[in-house]
Amino acid sequence: MVRKKVAILGAAGRDFHNFNVYFRDHQEYEVVAFTATQIPGIDDKKYPAELAGPFYPKGIPIVPEDTLSQLIEDYGVELVVLAYSDLPYDYVMHRAAIANAAGADFTLMGGQHTMIKAEKPVVAVCAVRTGCGKSQTSRKVCDILLKKGYKVVAIRHPMPYGDLVKQRCQRFAKYEDLDNEDCTIEEREEYEPYIDMGMVVYAGVEYAEILKKAEKEADIIVWDGGNNDLPFYKPDLHIVVADPHRAGHEKRYYPGETNLRMADVIVINKEATAIKGDIETVKKNIAELNPEAVVIDANSPVTADEPDGIKGKRVLVIEDGPTLTHGGMPYGAGFIAAEKYDAAEIVDPRPYAVGSIKKVYQKYSHLTSILPAMGYGDQQVKELEGTINKANCDLVISGTPIDIKRVLATEKPIVRVRYELEEIGKPDLKEVLDAFSTLVGKKG
């Protein structure tokens, strides 16, 4: 049999999952390469033979996405599969044009072949864009279910940027686990809040294996999605978060619109700081695309650990990295806290940027007054520290979901900002989860 040659475009997450659950053991296809983008330092590697299976004894190369045309020519690629997320529709179609012009077919995979069916009930929390508020929504869901007496385990969308074999199946239950796994700042931002809640969170590369292990500990699985990607597991309840600060994006970004159309419940977050007309735009789009969904109005109120210390100070604001970079937001919770608590000035971090942090500002020109918490490796963490230490400011406001002092060495005082989901009126998540609970006994 002549196997069809395939290239998978990705960013060290969805691409590996699609390969594992569909292409790896499929005799009709030969995946000749993954391409990589979005995340620094993940290209020019290999998907290891230990994970790639018997058809790939040498592993599979991971190459920069900007080599796609040459890759198609060199390997005779017949099918290009786009497998990463939070992409504007014109970006997606530009990739399709590159593939088609080089002679290859182009496809996007749906849930039929990529969602794994679980034995335990699954609540999936996804979004229409990065930075809508999945994390606080996931925490709220977990808190409600824990208070109802269920054993809840979270499984997080992958972020395997290091040794993929070592990261095959990761379990985090205490802070030491984060250190032992050499977690990046981005990974810590997602795992640490669950540890603070006394929960276990899984992540990694092999999501069929991860599910089997998590199900042994759980009555209910909570899938905490990444970016605006689709769930890896078939959800029994699908909650999707929308952001009126980016009204209209729910119809213009892949695969966020797919999530919106699939959702059982849609949470419109951050309403207190959004323009009323933008909230109405989101509701209008929901009514058009998914009129049967339950719609929940919500806020994510921002608080600071030491609010009195902010007033009158010149502050450097650090925010969650992915929200600012491929999420496209120009600010986050730290910026809101600086204004709320009357900082005298929000210091522009760009003149102080060093190394790869300079390149971040060159790539994401919409960032002006905010420092994204980039930390995809030891060197980048040092460059982030160097940027902070050079900055002429009185203190640092951290809007990331973690205690960033655990990973950064800086003498500057750091004030931590927090935000939790707060529903407005009815319906709310408790009502939704009370109804969902009737499924648990039937499936669990």
Image (cartoon, grey):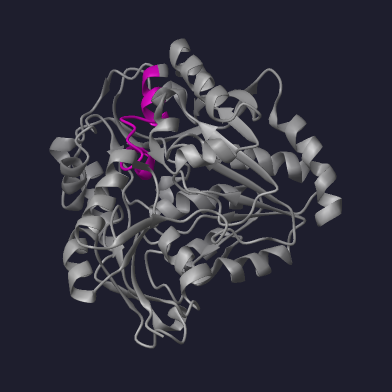
Q: Is residue 324 magenta?
A: yes
Question: Toward the viewer: 187 or 108?
Answer: 108
**Residue 325 coordinates in the image, percent (x, y):** 30, 42
- Which residue lies most toward the top here? 276
User: Could one spot residue 377 in this view of the protein?
Assistant: no
State the residue at coordinates (47%, 11%).
276
**Residue 123 coordinates in the image, percent (x, y):** 67, 47
State the residue at coordinates (47%, 34%).
132
Q: Is residue 74 left or right of residue 289?
A: left
Q: Is residue 94 left or right of residue 259?
A: left
Q: Is residue 37 magenta?
A: no
The quadrant where residue 428 appears = top right
Image label count: 0
The quadrant where residue 309 appears = top left
**Up-down: is 132 above or below 66?**
above
Q: Image quadrant for the C terminus?
A: bottom right
Q: Is residue 77 left or right of residue 4?
A: left
**Residue 20 coordinates in the image, percent (x, y):** 49, 71
Question: Toward the viewer: 222 or 348?
Answer: 222
Question: Toward the viewer: 181 or 19?
Answer: 19
Q: Which residues are magenta?
A: 319-339
**Up-down: is 275 above or below 157?**
above
Q: Is residue 17 left or right of residue 138?
A: left
State the residue at coordinates (13%, 36%).
351
User: Could one spot residue 319 in this view of the protein?
Assistant: yes
**Residue 306 coordinates in the image, percent (x, y):** 47, 28
Q: Image quadrant for the N terminus?
A: bottom left
**Up-down: is 316 above or below 326?**
above
